[in-house]
Image (tube, helix red, strand yellow):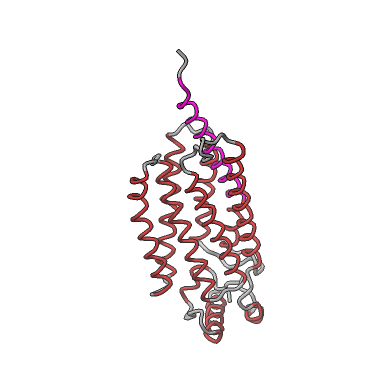
Amino acid sequence: VVVHGTHKSLCICNGKSWDVKVIAVITVWLIERKNGNLLVMSLSSTMVNGPSSEPASVAFSVLNLAMHFHGWLSFFITLYYKLPLKQDKTAYYEYVGLWHMYGLLSMNSWFWSAVFHSRDVDITERLDYSSAIAVLGFSLILAILRTFDVRVEAARVMVSAPILAFVTTHILYINFYKLDYGWNMIVCVTMGVAQLLLWARWAAVSRHPSSWKLWVVVVAGGLAMLLEIYDFPPYEGYFDAHSIWHAITIPLTVLWWSFIRDDAEFRTSSLLKKSKPKAK
């Protein structure tokens, strides 16, 4: 059963009973009809679709997963097959492990997004929300470490620990205490905006050759985030604000991984230049 955006807070559905879900759908449908929303599908169509009625979001989630896999794989190939390596066959790039973890968390998040939008039940919803929060929290850590050029391991732990503690607590809260959609939205938007501002500041002050890619991702990502905040019902029963946000993130993912590869090349080149002995 699909109840979009802020309308979910109107439901009495806890995801554990099909009867309760039916009541929730009927309740929201009646409210929307009373408000004169002509975009609402017929009740029979809503009921027949059941828990598998977001094909657009499923398709876009799968495409995002594919783009992250392609980006992560190309990043791996760039590091270990195109760029010089140290004598111990490790990369010069200091953030390689962080980006690998980011890629895995992102693919996990989009996988559960596709599962949730194809089968909206309690467990898939919680896995979707939890994986999204995890990647947002880790992305914030990565943004802080990269934009402030934190390379000392002890300093990285000091930065990461409080954020990891908060993210873990939040995931436990929504899974085992209360799945509060409003509070979860505040947490996700706050972490998302924070990292966008960090990358924007860094793009403005750094002399990175690919800073323009950052600007595109930051500006477009910020505008796309509005679709998550200001929801609207699905057009023709398929394309709601959430699915359109999924669609917009596909090209942004391609550009984002392109920046990550460029950053690896830029940092490796800079480190190699510094390591070369100066000619007398």
Q: Residue at x 53, y 58 (%)?
A: 227
Q: In the shown orientation, is residue 180 left or right of residue 27? A: left
Residue 19, placed above or below residue 129 = below
In the image shown, does 125 or 264 lie closer to the viewer?
264
Q: Residue at x 63, y 81 (%)?
A: 47
Residue 25, placed above or below residue 74 = below
Q: Residue furthest top?
A: 280
Q: Where does the C terminus fall, quadrant-wise?
A: top left
Q: In the shown orientation, is residue 189 left or right of residue 121? A: left
* Residue 98 position in % (x across, y down): 47, 48
Residue 87, placed above or below residue 66 = above
Q: Quadrant of residue 149?
A: top left
Main SS class of the magenta portion in the image:
helix
In the image shown, does 36 or 144 lie closer to the viewer?
144
Residue 61 drawn in magenta: no
In the image shown, does 170 or 46 lie closer to the viewer?
170
Residue bounds of the magenta highlight:
251-277
- All told, the count of numbered labels is 0
Q: Residue furthest front?
A: 88
* Residue 78 position in % (x across, y down): 60, 40
Q: Residue furthest bottom?
A: 19
* Residue 184 position in % (x across, y down): 42, 65
Residue 260 drawn in magenta: yes
Q: Residue at x 58, y 41 (%)?
A: 80
* Residue 173 position in % (x across, y down): 38, 70
Residue 158, placed above or below residue 122 = above
Q: Residue at x 39, y 41 (%)?
A: 151
Q: Where does the N terminus fall, quadrant-wise?
A: bottom right
